[in-house]
Image (cartoon, coloured by chain):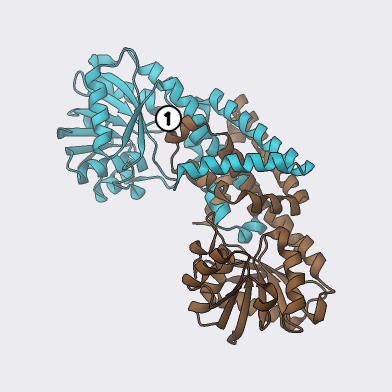
Chain colours: A brown, B cyan
Amino acid sequence: MNRLENVAIVGVGLIGGSIGLALRQRGLAEKVTGIGRRQVSLRIARRVGAVTNTSIDLAKGVAGADLVVVCTPVGRIVEDVRRAAEYCPKGTLITDTGSTKRTIVEALDTGLPRKCRFLGGHPLAGGERGGPVNAQPELFNGHVAVITPTMNTRAEDFDLLEEFWMSLGSMVVQMPAAEHDRALAMTSHLPHVAATALAAIIPEQLFRLTGTGFWDTTRLACGDPSLWMQILELNRDHVLSALEEYGGTLAALHAAIRDGNQAELERILTTAKKNRDALGS
Amino acid sequence: MNRLENVAIVGVGLIGGSIGLALRQRGLAEKVTGIGRRQVSLRIARRVGAVTNTSIDLAKGVAGADLVVVCTPVGRIVEDVRRAAEYCPKGTLITDTGSTKRTIVEALDTGLPRKCRFLGGHPLAGGERGGPVNAQPELFNGHVAVITPTMNTRAEDFDLLEEFWMSLGSMVVQMPAAEHDRALAMTSHLPHVAATALAAIIPEQLFRLTGTGFWDTTRLACGDPSLWMQILELNRDHVLSALEEYGGTLAALHAAIRDGNQAELERILTTAKKNRDALGS
């Protein structure tokens, strides 16, 4: 990627902070401006080397940006992109990293002020522990980053964003926003709900009888409830469908165990193992 | 622990192999005899240093044992313990490492031949990748090992088994076998079923859109289907109850998402996070 002069990152949590760290450590941006609402997060982001400059004033923070990356919680992205468009240089590309895409892309696909353009993104990387203190420069390396172009997307914007994620080590996959949301309901949002339900029902007296299996299976439940309430709301229909499919398979497992239907039980266990083995890691 | 002269391990997979490795590397046993049905596994167990001697003949393998540890799949344990009792030295303690305990303990609590005695055990450690090739000497270090004594258990047998697991680094917890099974249905068997259902429904075209969250949540699905069919059958009632409780919480999450009931959604997400955060790791 051609070195960028100034990348503005709105929201310097785990994702925003990791983007900044990666840009800095890979020498991809001269200046990385972190914009946030809390001085304490911005100070941490600067201390860990994720940003070179900070601002709690969005207007000032995006003023000289070549590229604006909005990494705030999904429920705030539309508003933050619109506000950034008002203050960043005319015609700047703005992207995001939200876990849901359709409502965001539909709201921002056209009509941004001052010829700014939005192109949605979502790096499939993260962690349960948020905040810039947990930022990692290699967070995106080897992971997929989804870009969700529309009929209105300019080729040069797509190319810039593709190059951006590739330069951070990601493999870029493009798809329509609606397709992204349907897929992520199954690969990310459903696992979050499944882990949550499991962690919610374990009684405290059984904590000592948990092991690595329980820990792995429920790790997602450490995620921030307020972030996840927004994600589940913005992808409601697909999440509900995924939950219904999951419930159906759990019911089939329940019936097979109850009835001693070894053939059916083996079929489901074997299918699951084949799929999971194919994923590695 | 006083150094044992000869520990016989029946079934040298991941668990049996790891016990052997730990005994050897910690200098706890002079001789560790691995007994199995397949020469290839026994050869691997010897090559990785898990056992000093091997036998495919149970009668010969247990002949000089001070302690017999049966690490075969749960569906085979009762038979393997009974057979070991016929051939090991008179009055030897035999234990196991099975993931279910009630049916095994009930079948073996009294009446073993030649004054041999059985005391059930279950180390809460493991991994999805089985076989002696994956054995680790520190597999049990820092993890709980459950011992399930009965009214008939001799104090000296309990003490020996407690010392055995503690010498491998485990923290010993004792409880009745039925209580173990009810607890493990929730902490181990339900997570396995939950992970299985999730891994079973993911379509192949979405594999590339999975990330660490999906991988963690479904890791248990890599387990051996035939082992898990036995576990789910032997702990059927408790597993079904746990599945029903899980289904109820998933249904509550579904309703809260569908109805936009943010208060209920937050309540469940927050409970889950509090529980999971308390577990660490």
Q: Residues within 10 Å of mark 1 (few under 14, many from 20)?
A: many
| Residue B14 x, y percent position in the rendering | 36, 43
Query: Could you say which is closer to the camera, residue B34 or residue B253?
Result: B253
The residue identified by callout 1 is: B74
| Residue A28 x, y percent position in the rendering | 55, 82
Q: Residue at x 29, y 43 (%)?
A: B42
| Quadrant housing residue A194 | top right
Helix, strand, or loop for circle 1? helix
| Residue B74 x, y percent position in the rendering | 42, 30
| Residue B94 x, y percent position in the rendering | 28, 25
Give the side of residue B44 with respect to residue A54, left or right: left
Question: What's the amino acid at mark 1?
Answer: Val
Q: Is residue A102 visible?
A: yes
Q: How many marks?
A: 1
Q: Residue at x 40, y 28 (%)?
A: B76
Give the side of residue B152 with respect to residue B188, left or right: left
